[in-house]
Amino acid sequence: MLKLMLILLAFFVFLHSRSELSQDRVDPILDSLALRFASTVATGSDEAARATALHVDPGIHLRRRVVSHLPISAGEVEVPGALLAFDLDEATLFEPETALIVRDRLVLLHRLAQALSEHEVGRGSVLVVTTGWPDEATTLTATRLRTLESIFADTALATSRVRLGVANLPAGIWRFSIRAGHGHAA
């Protein structure tokens, strides 16, 4: 009996080792589930057709992919003309009083760049990163902007598709917005 159980165990270990989950195999399943279960509208109606069109919209898929990587502390904001915009507090983005990026946020930035470079809608968009310009610590803010620039330069996202600058934002807020690439001034 023990030998039979060991043979069965070896067989199931072999089957498990041969199975593989890749993003190419899982993405269609997740998209299908999102399309089926995200809408509470009865099928067959005009509203159901509009809801289905929204779920098939590539911009919605890009948004879902980016939002899935955002930390809880990221506040999503409405920015005119942006596909998606979110704010990060500098205390959660950078190490205190330095231009070093927190490790978890570094992963977020690389995943954001990857999503924008791989996704159909992402390839035609521009990432705009802005922050307020404080009266004090201007050198630190400038250094942090250069740090972000160098990080995005090391990703698959083309440097021509990243804009860094200052805006009229509350102190300590860093805003990331994804905008359609056509019509966005350099």
Image (cartoon, rainbow, N blue to C red):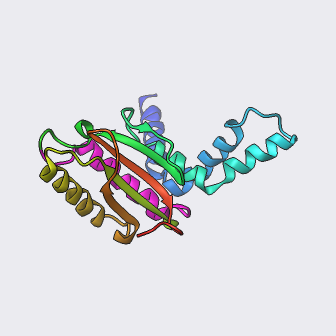
In percent of width and height, residue 22 lies at 48, 54
State the residue at coordinates (27%, 39%).
171
In percent of width and height, residue 101 lies at 21, 47
In percent of width and height, residue 167 lies at 34, 51
In percent of width and height, residue 50 lies at 77, 46
Q: Is residue 99 visible?
A: no
Q: Is residue 108 magenta?
A: yes
State the residue at coordinates (47%, 43%).
67
> In front: 52, or 131?
131
Dominant SS of magenta comes to helix
Q: Is residue 74 magenta?
A: no
State the residue at coordinates (51%, 53%).
82
Where the C terminus falls, by quadrant? bottom left
State the residue at coordinates (46%, 28%).
1
The total of numbered circles placed on residues is 0
From this view, report whether residue 20 is shown above or below residue 71.
below
Magenta region, residue range: 98-122
Based on the displayed image, in which of its 4 quarters is residue 152 positioned? bottom left
> In front: 116, or 31?
116
Q: Is residue 146 visible?
A: yes
